[in-house]
Image (tube, rainbow, N blue to C red):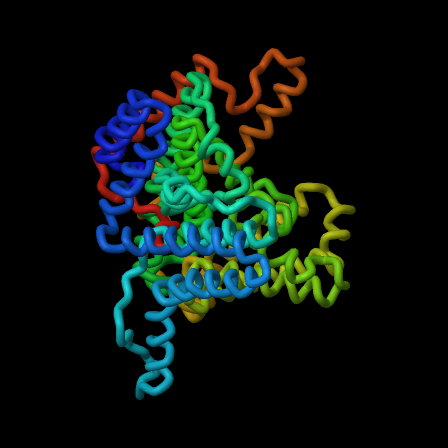
Amino acid sequence: MVFSSMLFLWIFLPLVLAAYYISPGKIRNGILVFFSLLFYAWGEPLYVFLMLFSVAVNFTGGILIEKYQTRKKKILVATLLINLGLLGYFKYFGTLTEAITGLFSADGIGTTLFQVALPIGISFYTFQALSYVIDVYRGEVPAQHNFWHMLLYISFFPQLIAGPIVKYRDIAAQITGRKETIRKFAAGIMRFCWGLGKKVLLANSFARVVDEIFKYGPYAVSRKALWLGAILYMMQIYYDFSGYSDMAIGLGKMFGFEFQENFNYPYTAGSVQEFWHRWHISLSSWFRDYVYIPLGGNRKGAACTYRNLLIVFFLTGMWHGAGIAFILWGLYHGLFLILERVWLGKKLEKLPGIVGWGYTVTAVFFGWILFRAENISLFFTYVRNMFVAHGGTILLSAYLDSKMIFLIVMGVLFAGVLQKIYEKVRVHSAGKIPANGMVTVPRMIACMVIFWLSVAALVNNSYNPFIYFRF
């Protein structure tokens, strides 16, 4: 079940909202747990038990860490090994066996000996669980002694399968003491509708073209069309993932929760470092808090800092998948961060802001081609054919019509351009213009228009997957 489906919009969401708000406060968390498990079991009827096992392991681990202080390190290590072992088996075992068999096959092409289905959301809920037991170990939060509260933290359906990755310390108080208000509920509806529009009206439209261009490949598609495919993918992944995050944050507000922002207009960044402060913020902050800083961060000299950055971005690539393209994509970004620390960052500070922006967009743009490519050979061929004539017969005109031009313009404007203009105008209005995100009647009307346009698009099209579901 996905947020942008008729089943969710017209059946699941109305049912859970009705059940939640007609129930007494004491059982509302139970209502959310029940519907969250139903939500996950709808697509993963078997793997819901895997998630329950993960919750039980981390619930028990937290209590034992708190109780047995002299042995808490051993308990933490055991809990981490179980979590990472499950994640590693389901996410990487198939790719690993394929690579190993490829080494010994005559043609160098591997076969997967055991096909292991990837449980939806395992990377997200595993990282949430890890943050909990690590924070208990550090003494930053007390262990949770109510299993149902722990289950709600891990399984809450808005952020269960594609984030944001919510740290326990950021939400623990909300599990037992949140306050639902009409204004917060209205803000949640607005945020959800905005995210739905980003996903359905923009990301899905871009995805159909991107998938077709990558399906035909860099030899069949003309040079200009290859550029279009790469540009649209850059827009698709942003609107797909940020749209999901907007919907998740909006749904959380409907039930009184406040989740961390996951995107802050990353394509307006003036450096790759700033890009990562704005892109998938919950993942970046997770690696900062639980990997980068414990390794020493930037406190032990330049060499250690560069090493730590490479480790973090190697793991960032691995988090997305075991494929070599993901790992190289992570290291690619890590190298840019090192370059910026060595000398490039200081150079950019002395240049006009548009230079830093152009450099960042270019670096991120080619990184997304690597991310989207199935292998390194495809990446290099795709990039090469973007610059040289190669006889591709599928032309730009096959994809670039007036509707697509309009969508591209909208994609560029809403990726941060309009928001920056709005904030500048608001600052000079002496408070007469409301801040971005505030509930107003015109904004509610605009969101309702976006909602019905999205519903109409869903009725007419069946293409609706979220990119980050496979991570």
Q: Position of residue 42 (x, y in %)?
A: 23, 45
Quarter holding the C terminus? bottom left
* Residue drawn at 78 percent across, 46 percent down: 350
Relative depth, front residue between 268 and 152: 152
Foreground: 119 or 332? 119
Closest to the observer: 414 or 464?
464
Residue 458 lies, with reference to residue 272, above or below; the image says above
Q: Position of residue 182 (x, y in %)?
A: 42, 17
5 versus 324 height, above or below: above
Q: How many marks?
A: 0
Q: Is residue 106 left or right of residue 134?
A: left
- At x 61%, y 64%, the residue is 310
Residue 189 visible in image:
yes
From the top left corner, tell me how far across and down residue 455 is, in percent. 27, 29
Q: In which quadrant will I find the N terminus?
A: top left
Asked where in the image residue 69 lies, by quadrant, the reply is bottom right
Place of residue 457 in the rendered image (x, y in percent of width and height, measured from the top left): 27, 33
The answer to whether residue 384 shows anywhere in this view is no
As drawn, 206 above or below 8? below
Q: Nearer the viewer, residue 371 or 114?
A: 114
On the image, which quarter does residue 96 sit in?
bottom left
**Residue that appears at 51% across and 20% down:** 438
Q: What residue is rendered at 54% in x and 34% in y?
A: 416
